[in-house]
Amino acid sequence: MSIGSVGAVGGELHEQRPAQQSLGTAAARNLATTTKSVPQMQEITSRWLLRMLPWVQVEGGAYRVNRRLTYTVGDGRVTFVQTGDRVAVVPAELGELPALRGFEDEAALAELANRCEQRTYEAGRPLAEAGTPADRVILLAHGRVEQIGEGPYGDETVVDVLADGAYLGEASLTDADAVWQYTARAATACTVLVLTRDDVLNLADRAESLRSHLAGFAALPAQRTNTYGEAAIDLSAGHVGEAVVPHTFVDYDLSPREYELSVAQTVLKIHSRVADLYNQPMNQTEQQLRLTVEALRERQEDELVNNREFGLLANCDYSQRLQPHDGAPTPDDLDELLSRRRGSKLFLAHPKAIAAFGRECNRRGLVPGTVEVGGSQVPAWRGVPIFPCSKIPITAARTTSIICMRTGEADQGVIGLQQAGIPDEIEPSLSVRFMGINEQAIISYLVTAYYSAAVLVPDALGVLENVEVGRRG
């Protein structure tokens, strides 16, 4: 046995370690200057929406969107409440039907809601047949319904796809000779509420308010409108000789919508001792502010997508909301989304929706193109870039939405609203204000961002809803 290798102490064997011959790394680090990164943050995303929206300067904190006079035709959605397996329509929501728009008798609306009969349809079953008398309104509580028409060569074609909140047969309430223009067929299992014309007329016999409202609706003269519901402008073209040229004027909406700038704020607190002593090699106050501003910008983009007052998803016109023909987002669906507007500038989709679209393209043997935006290669369809946006929600049913829009004031598109030049501004429409130091020597800064978004005309923004992202081919 070599001396100094193993020894016996108290009957136990112990290994004898050799004496240390150089300075250990743990001790050496106390004298070394560590190379370090600035604080990192997983919440930061690409924020393409903030980068691609044209931002318009708003003086006075509000932006008014003036439009031509548009006659509302009641093309909203009906809301339901569910209790177990029973579904009921919210009585006031029956006012979304054109014949009941503006009708405010709560008791009569409640009676009509109680008369709605719940029915279920399996996938593939027809809800109504084209050419047959229309004697009822069908309110779609849940599911997808295809409107089937006849193609130019006599074959069946899907004219439209309806989803939760839609309705069919609204003309039956006031027209005894109404017929179904299309066959309505359940694409998935559907739950609907049915309100018959007989039920409405029976109640009208007893309720004077409903009877007079329906009579007044039937007596209203048909408004002369263009295909977008705007008050018509009388024009004459192709005439010869001394024809009388029509007189006209452009009527404006008397109650234009105003968008007020929204706000996102927080108070950043930093102890004065940290701000004074711990600023090498990087300034603590600057890093705290940098991360706070990043979080504020993330919240701003989330609000621009999801806010109920001005967010893109909530403010898309119902006529510009589409349903996928087969659940998953296909090239056909994006083509239809593009066809609803001129000059589409961009798509916005959750990354999982982009992946689902890619799978559908692979299934068809198609390769989506790419375009260069700001030095980055971005996937595109028909030359329109598809930007990822994780702020678009995915529901528990694994469905999401894809947004398509035209942007800019000159193109009557979607614009962002801000007010640059505010006091203590560090970025356009974002300020950092010193609020003082309290008794605990804590410095406070008020960090504020002002923003909003406006849709100048309805067809500037379209949404493909209920897109499935979990389907595997």
Image (cartoon, rainbow, N blue to C red):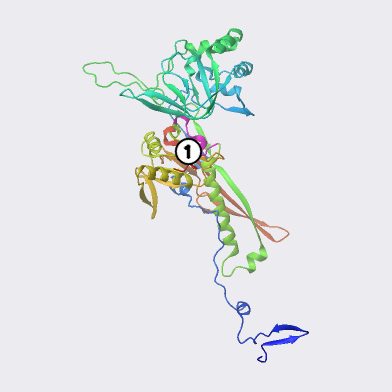
Q: Nearer the viewer, residue 173 or 422?
A: 173
Q: Which residues are magenta?
A: 309-319
Residue at the disc numbered 1: 467
The quadrant of the image that shows the C terminus is top left
Q: Residue furthest top?
A: 205
Q: Which residue is at the far right?
A: 10
In depth, the one of 312 and 263 nearer the eye is 312
Q: Is residue 84 visible to the viewer in this orientation of the structure? A: yes
Instruction: Tell me what residue is drawn at x 76 percent, y 86 percent.
Output: 9
Q: Position of residue 203 (x, y in %)?
A: 59, 11
Task: Please identify the quarter of the rendering in which residue 276 is found.
Answer: bottom right
> Which quarter of the figure is the N terminus placed in?
bottom right
| Farthest left residue in view | 241
Question: Which one is nearer the viewer's eye here, 217 or 165?
Answer: 165
Q: Is residue 154 magenta?
A: no
The picture quadrant where one finds residue 357 is top left
Measured as percent of width and height from the top left, residue 250 is found at 39, 25
**In screen coordinates, is 10 left or right of 214?**
right
In terms of depth relative to the viewer, which is nearer, 414 or 201? 201
Q: Is residue 252 visible?
A: no
**311 is within the stretch colored magenta:** yes
Q: Quadrant of residue 458?
A: top left
Q: Could you tell me which residue is drawn at 54 percent across and 50 percent down?
A: 298
Residue 300 location, x and y as percent?
54, 46
Instruction: State how many labels appear.
Output: 1
Residue reaching furthest to the bottom: 3
Local SS, label 1: strand
Q: What residue is rendered at 38% in x and 35% in y?
A: 336
| x then y, percent, for residue 24 | 61, 81
How packed mark 1 is, by other alpha carbons closer than 10 Å (few <14, some 14-19, many 20 or more), is many
